Image (tube, rainbow, N blue to C red):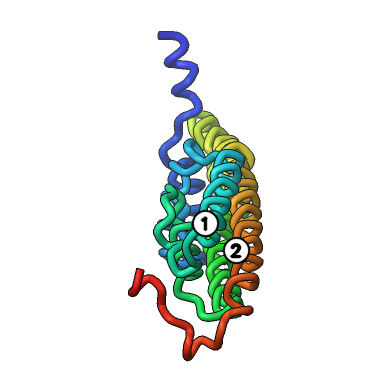
Amino acid sequence: MILIDQFARYIDPAAMLIVFGGTLLTTLFRSPLSDIGRALGSLGLMATANPNADAAAARVSVSRIRELAQLRAIACVDRVETAQRFLIRAARELSDARSSGDFVRWASADVDARRLRHQGVIGVWRSMAEAAPAMGMIGTIIGLVQMFSAMEDPAAIGPAMAMAMLTTLYGVILSSGIAAPIAGRLETISEAELAWQTAACKQLEVLAREELDSQPPAAVRPNLRTVM
């Protein structure tokens, strides 16, 4: 019971509304709704993401794609079995490509688009980390104003001072204890994911140069998927 009473001292709905509500409102103004939706969805990703395992699996999948291209034809590599959706799309684009340039253009566009999406999501959490202390300071100022305006009423000074301190506490917790660590974790995951995807695309680009650029022009090159 004593522990509950001690904990209850740190709960102030008005202070929470100022800090959490103000931070959310600021983030809504600064970030597109699509980025905010993805930012919330990224919370589940942090618990399941394993960039090292993904990179190892990608190396295996790329080796399978190369083996399939050597055994049959590059137009058949879209039949490779892999659990990674990025490599499924990459294999499909590679099988449809008429030259290595086609595949390189797709790979560059896809990786760049993915990087922008990641930056948008990370930016949402960075925005929250930046806004939370400011909201805490606003709450502190409001609490101090209330306190100074009620100096003649000792009973009103305590709650006003508590709100002033709690808004600062909430701002620090939200910024340094929640939003900033999430942004840092997502940035690490993003860098690792983009690294293995870029490496996989470079290996597939080499395969495309070997198999496609030495072939007859696209106009006369048959689509082997339709005849095999």
Horizontal and vertical percent position of residue 156: 49, 34
- The part of the image, by quadrant, that contains residue 76 is bottom left
Q: Residue at x 64, y 73 (%)?
A: 209
Residue located beneath label 1 in the image? 65
Under circle 1, the secondary element is: helix
**Cβ–Cβ under 8 Å for marks 1 and 2:** yes
Task: Give, as a three-letter code, the residue at label 2.
Answer: Leu
Q: N-terminal of the two: label 1 or label 2?
A: 1
Q: Nearer the viewer, mark 1 or mark 2?
A: 1
Which residue is at the far top?
1
Indicate left or right for 57 with 224 as reference. Answer: right
Horizontal and vertical percent position of residue 21: 44, 50
In this rendering, the answer to whether 195 lies above or below 115 is above
- Which numbered marker is on residue 204? 2
Task: Give, as a three-letter code, the residue at label 1.
Answer: Ile
Residue placed most toward the observer, 125 or 132? 125
Q: Residue at x 65, y 57 (%)?
A: 199
Indicate left or right for 227 with 163 as reference. Answer: left
Q: Residue at x 58, y 80 (%)?
A: 215
Quadrant that contains the N terminus: top left
Horizontal and vertical percent position of residue 170: 55, 38
Residue placed most toward the observer, 94 or 130? 94
In this rendering, the answer to whether 173 lies above or below 75 is above
Residue placed most toward the observer, 140 or 198? 198
**Does residue 165 appear in the picture of this structure?**
yes
Horizontal and vertical percent position of residue 23: 51, 53
Quadrant that contains the C terminus: bottom left
Q: Tell me if mark 2 has few (under 14), some (14-19) or many (20+) residues whose alpha carbon lies within 10 angstroms of its own.
A: many
In this rendering, the answer to whether 160 lies above or below 26 is above
